[in-house]
Image (tube, helix red, strand yellow):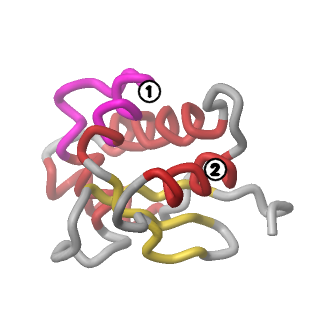
């Protein structure tokens, strides 16, 4: 499940010049990669990042998603693990950026939460 509504995905895809399907597939691949991160739950991964980075990456914790601003190296690792196509990367960054203030440091990353994990 994506933490973005259909209208946002469609708008970002159109603005970025990629197909809505390609953007949705890339976002779903990132979500699946994070959900299956080796040895960690999504909540555990977010906790680890919050402890590991000098600046807390947490922007907001919603019932449906974690909103983070992570270092570029984390985004590169996630997108490589998710095998995000090169031609969709900028659109995917723009999609995630719809959920944060772009003046903050780091790259926006929105991670869907399991509704049972509160």
Where does the magenta region start and end? Answer: 75-90
The x and y percentages for residue 12 are 25, 58
Disc 2 secondary structure class: loop
Question: Which corner quadrant of the image does residue 33 belong to?
Answer: top right
| Main SS category, magenta section | helix
Magenta stretch: includes residue 85? yes
The circle drawn on residue 101 is none
Q: Residue 80 lies in what quarter of the image?
A: top left
Label 1 – label 2 distance at C-alpha: 15 Å
- Relative vertical location of residue 50 with respect to residue 24 in this rendering, above or below: below
Depicted 95 relative to depicted 22: above or below = below
Along the line of sight, which residue is nearer the eye, 15 or 53? Answer: 53
Asked whether 30 or 70 is in front, the reply is 70
Q: Residue at x 33, y 74 (%)?
A: 100
x%, y% of residue 24? 43, 43
Q: Residue at x 61, y 31 (%)?
A: 37
Q: Is residue 37 magenta?
A: no
Give the crowd class for mark 1: few <14, some 14-19, many >=20 residues within 10 Å.
Answer: some
Q: Secondary structure at mark 1?
A: loop
Q: Residue at x 60, y 46 (%)?
A: 45
Residue topped by disc 2: 1
Mark 1 / mark 2, whichever is N-terminal: 2
- Residue 5, how many percent across, how many down? 49, 65
Seen from the viewer's position, the closer of residues 97 and 49 is: 49
Mark seen at residue 82: 1
In the rendered image, the quadrant that contains the C terminus is bottom right
Task: State which mark lies toward you, 1 or 2.
Answer: 1
Q: Residues within 10 Å of mark 2 (few under 14, many from 20)?
A: few
Total number of numbered discs in the rendering: 2
Q: Is residue 60 above or below residue 91?
A: below
Quadrant of residue 105 in the image? Answer: bottom left
Q: Using residue 8 as the reference point, say whether residue 94 is left or right of it.
A: left
């Amino acid at each position: 499940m994506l933490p973005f509504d259909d209208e946002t995905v469609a708008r970002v895809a159109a603005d970025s010049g990629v197909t809505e399907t390609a953007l949705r597939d890339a976002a779903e691949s990132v979500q699946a990669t994070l959900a299956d991160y080796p040895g960690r739950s999504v909540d555990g991964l977010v906790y680890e990042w919050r402890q590991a980075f000098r600046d807390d990456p947490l922007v907001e914790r919603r019932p449906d998603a974690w909103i983070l601003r992570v270092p570029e190296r984390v985004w590169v690792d996630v997108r490589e693990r998710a095998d995000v196509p090169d031609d969709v990367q900028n659109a995917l960054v723009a999609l995630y950026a719809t959920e944060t203030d772009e003046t903050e440091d780091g790259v926006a990353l929105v991670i869907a939460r399991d509704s049972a994990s509160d």
